[in-house]
Image: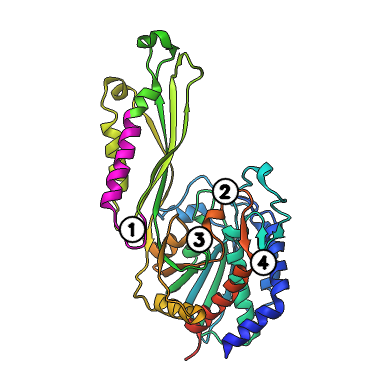
């Protein structure tokens, strides 16, 4: 059986597979440097029976999409696509991962070099280990194993390693969709602790800048306290969050969040601040598409006093990642959960991903039934001492290979 052969190959080559993941982690692929990793992955893929396509996003061609993020540049930054041809020359399954990582957070808190990486207590530590080089490598190795075993794909299987997911998000995957890299079904290898997820929240980040008039606070009536002008919005924002918690219900999610995360204000204890900057974010659930309107209503109601009517706060949208949801009854989702049940022996429950991902683009724009599934826990992403459990990474290779074999096998 193909399952036994997959297991055997992973067992025989597990040390080499971990070494390859470590090699990719050692390549600095922070925003703008993704080609360092694409070269590593390409060398591996070139040994397999696949067609490779390298291309950079072209902003002018992407402006037609509402999800396009402006202000990004793509010189020496390439998407890497590998097409494994099937017996029918039509696209059947797409595997998506992003090569870019966040920049190193709090370098002094790392117990080992984030790029050289380290294995301790069965955990591989390194920048991007969890988010999401383990998932990307797991998918690539799954295809490598199936190819070496002589597996015949019923239809084309596409592996894409995209750029520009973290810093603004999406233009790499958007460019791939624009070039026609779509399929009826897709897997995104974001870290889910190998739990399948078929939806994610919408996520919005914003900045509000309030202006006031500085003065000695003992005569504050001569000035305007910018922080106090921001208070009605802060109160209304959190009240909106409480209402959303009661109103927004979805079986896959705990609920939305509203969070103000940065307040920059003031120069001294006895000085009225002339500026207050708020930065925060909120999430909203699939099926609830009035979140932006709700936010704007709160802002409008909190800006009714005479000063704010003449000096309204400046609103900047930092990002807007829309939600997505794939139908649990889709044939691919049923195939995937059946494979996973056979793999683990447990009942498989589809869940919702608590943050945004390129999955929304595959589902909403590419019309693909999309599952998020990968090794690592999202809690460990974007923080010092990021890690993935080595055994979970190896299990992901086996799981991906079985999912592909079951769904893309010839009848």
Q: Alpha carbon of mark 2 to alpha carbon of mark 4: how far?
A: 22 Å
Mark 4 neighbour class, 10 Å CA radius: few under 14, some 14 to 19, many 20 or more: many
The quarter of the rendered structure image containing the N terminus is: bottom right
Q: Nearer the viewer, residue 342 or 32?
A: 342
x and y percentages locating residue 106 in the rendered image = 63, 42
C-alpha distance separating marks 1 and 2: 31 Å
Tell me, yes or no, whether the two marked residues, 3 and 2, touch with CB atoms within 8 Å: no
Q: Is residue 172 left or right of residue 319?
A: right
Give the quadrant of residue 227: top left
3D distance between C-alphas at marks 4 and 3: 17 Å
Identify the residue position indicated by label 4 in the image.
41
Element class at badge 4: helix
Q: Can you see residue 82?
A: no
Check the image and report above or below for 336 versus 289.
below
Q: Which residue is mark 2?
A: 73
Say which of marks 4 and 1 sits in front. Answer: 1
Q: Secondary structure at mark 2?
A: loop
Q: Earlier in the sequence, mark 3 or mark 2?
A: 2
Indicate the position of residue 399 as horizontal and vertical percent values: 55, 76
Q: Which residue is mark 3?
A: 173
Instruction: Identify the residue position indicated by label 1 in the image.
Output: 286
Q: Dot 1 lies on which element? A: loop
Please state the extent of the stretch shown in magenta in the rendering. Answer: 232-254
Eye-nearest disc, 2 or 4 = 4
Q: Is residue 18 left or right of residue 190?
A: right
């Amino acid at each position: 059986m193909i399952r036994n052969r997959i297991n055997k190959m992973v067992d025989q080559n597990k040390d080499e597979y971990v070494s390859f993941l470590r090699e990719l982690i050692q390549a600095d692929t922070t925003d703008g440097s993704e080609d360092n990793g694409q070269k590593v992955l390409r060398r591996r893929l070139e040994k397999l029976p696949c067609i490779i396509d390298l291309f950079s996003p072209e902003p002018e061609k992407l402006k037609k999409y509402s999800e396009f993020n402006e202000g990004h540049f793509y010189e020496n930054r390439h998407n890497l696509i590998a097409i494994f041809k099937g017996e029918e020359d039509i696209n059947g399954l797409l595997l998506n991962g992003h090569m870019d990582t966040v920049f190193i957070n709090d370098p002094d808190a790392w117990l080992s070099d984030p790029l050289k990486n380290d294995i301790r207590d069965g955990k591989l530590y390194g920048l991007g280990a969890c988010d999401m080089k383990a998932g990307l490598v797991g998918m690539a190795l799954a295809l490598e194993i199936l190819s070496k075993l002589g597996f015949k794909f019923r239809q084309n299987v596409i592996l894409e390693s995209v750029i520009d997911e973290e810093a603004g998000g999406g233009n790499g995957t958007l460019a791939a969709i624009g070039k026609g890299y779509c399929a009826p079904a897709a897997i995104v290898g974001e870290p889910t602790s190998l739990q399948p997820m078929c939806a994610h929240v919408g996520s919005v980040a914003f900045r509000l800048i309030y202006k006031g008039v500085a003065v000695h606070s003992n005569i504050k009536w001569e000035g305007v306290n910018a922080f106090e002008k921001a208070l009605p919005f802060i109160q209304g924002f959190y009240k909106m969050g409480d209402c959303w918690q009661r109103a927004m219900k979805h079986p896959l999610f705990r609920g939305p969040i509203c969070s103000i995360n940065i307040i920059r204000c003031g120069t001294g204890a006895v000085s009225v601040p002339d500026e207050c900057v708020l930065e925060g974010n909120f999430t909203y659930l699939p099926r609830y598409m009035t979140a932006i309107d709700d936010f704007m209503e709160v802002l409008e109601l909190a800006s009714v006093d005479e000063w704010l009517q003449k000096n309204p706060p400046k609103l900047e949208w930092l990002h807007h990642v829309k939600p997505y949801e794939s139908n649990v009854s889709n044939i691919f989702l049923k195939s995937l959960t059946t494979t996973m049940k056979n793999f683990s022996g447990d009942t498989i429950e589809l869940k919702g991903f608590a943050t945004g991902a390129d999955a929304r683009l595959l589902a909403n724009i590419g019309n693909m039934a999309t599952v998020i599934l990968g090794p690592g826990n999202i809690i460990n992403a974007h923080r010092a001492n990021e890690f993935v459990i080595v055994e979970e990474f190896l299990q992901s290779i086996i799981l991906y290979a079985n999912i592909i074999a079951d769904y893309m096998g010839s009848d």
